[in-house]
Image (cartoon, rainbow, N blue to C red):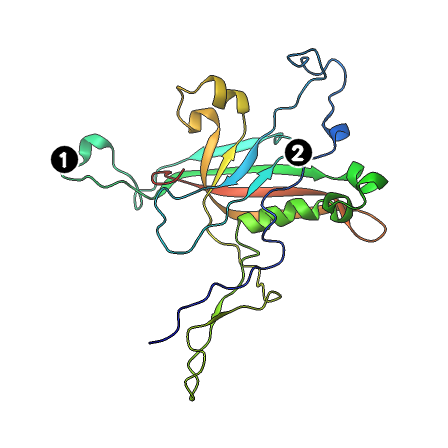
């Protein structure tokens, strides 16, 4: 009987499940550009975030890691498109047989695209944050969480073959440095408008600017660096294939 397969060792950095908070100075709103907080304090920005989607019933034995990417600001423009794909289309309810009890798990015939800005200027220039990750690597920490979420940092597991002498067949091995950077179809939730989500709960997800799908295109432009080439600012452009969220939460 072959030995049980072992879980591969953790890749460094995969335990970083969310990007750290941004400096309050970059979140401030100029006087008169926003309403005061509930207690008369400074105006607060409404900011969105992305999260790993969790299957209600795990389809495989592989455990999914859960990540959250907090936005610095909401995108200045959000583009959403919907279309009908006759070759891959969910038929309306009135055309389906009463015996068809299945739940469609298909592309929703729509796409989403938006751009994000990450800026760690204050963290990188503040000596009091020199010992923190955000003050050492700048926006690389934000991109790192995005990479984790999309599977870019997922380790490549190699299963050892049985040796002629009956060795360690079935053992899982992975070199922590052997990361190929393959983006995976990891489903995610994207939330843009917090007040729509909390004050208008009678609306469905799409009407509340809550989107479900997988990122099929990502572009990162690093624009500012320190003298030691640490990235201080970057722009991230994402394109998302919208999906039916049945079976996911």
Q: Quadrant of residue 86?
A: top left
Q: Quadrant of residue 32?
A: top right
Q: Residue at x 34, y 45 (%)?
A: 57
**Residue closer to the observer: 181 or 107:** 181
Residue 125 shows up from this direction: yes
**Which residue is tagged 1?**
98
Q: Is residue 17 left or right of residue 202?
A: right
Please, what secondary structure does the residue beneath circle 2 have?
Answer: loop
The residue sitting at the bottom extreme is 165
Q: Position of residue 188 (x, y in %)?
A: 48, 42
**CA neighbours of label 1 inside 10 A, class few (<14), some (14 to 19), many (20+):** few
Give the alpha-carbon distance from disc 1 to disc 2, as whole Å. Answer: 48 Å
Q: Position of residue 34 (x, y in %)?
A: 68, 15
Nearer mark to the viewer, of 1 and 2: 2
Q: Give the quadrant of the N terminus.
A: bottom left
Residue 126 shows up from this direction: no
Please, what secondary structure does the residue beneath circle 1 have?
Answer: loop
**Which residue is tagged 2?**
72
**Residue closer to the observer: 247 or 3:** 3
Q: Give the quadrant of the C terminus.
A: top left
User: Which badge, 1 or 2, comes first in the chain's sequence?
Assistant: 2
Q: Residue at x 83, y 39 (%)?
A: 128
What is the count of numbered marks?
2
Q: Is residue 144 left or right of residue 135?
A: left
């Amino acid at each position: 009987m072959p030995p049980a397969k072992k879980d591969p060792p953790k890749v460094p950095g995969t335990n970083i499940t969310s990007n750290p908070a941004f400096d309050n100075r970059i979140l401030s709103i100029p006087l008169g550009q926003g309403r005061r907080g509930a207690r008369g304090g400074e105006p607060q920005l409404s900011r969105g975030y992305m999260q790993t989607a969790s299957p209600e019933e795990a389809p495989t034995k592989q455990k999914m890691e859960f990540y959250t990417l907090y936005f610095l600001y909401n995108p200045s423009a959000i583009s959403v498109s919907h279309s009908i794909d006759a070759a891959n289309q969910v038929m309306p309810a009135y055309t389906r047989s009463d015996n068809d009890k299945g739940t469609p798990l298909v592309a929703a015939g729509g796409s989403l695209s938006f751009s994000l800005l990450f800026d760690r200027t204050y963290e990188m220039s503040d000596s009091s944050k020199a010992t923190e990750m955000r003050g050492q690597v700048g926006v690389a920490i934000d991109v790192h969480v995005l990479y984790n979420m999309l599977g870019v940092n997922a380790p490549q597991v190699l299963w050892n073959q049985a040796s002629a002498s009956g060795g360690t067949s079935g053992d899982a091995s992975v070199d922590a440095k052997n990361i190929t950077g393959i983006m995976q179809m990891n489903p995610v939730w994207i939330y843009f408008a917090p007040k729509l989500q909390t004050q208008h709960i009678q609306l469905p997800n799409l009407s509340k600017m809550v989107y479900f799908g997988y990122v099929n295109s990502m572009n990162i432009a690093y624009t500012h660096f320190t003298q030691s080439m640490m990235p201080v600012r970057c722009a991230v452009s994402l394109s998302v294939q919208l999906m039916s969220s049945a079976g996911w939460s």
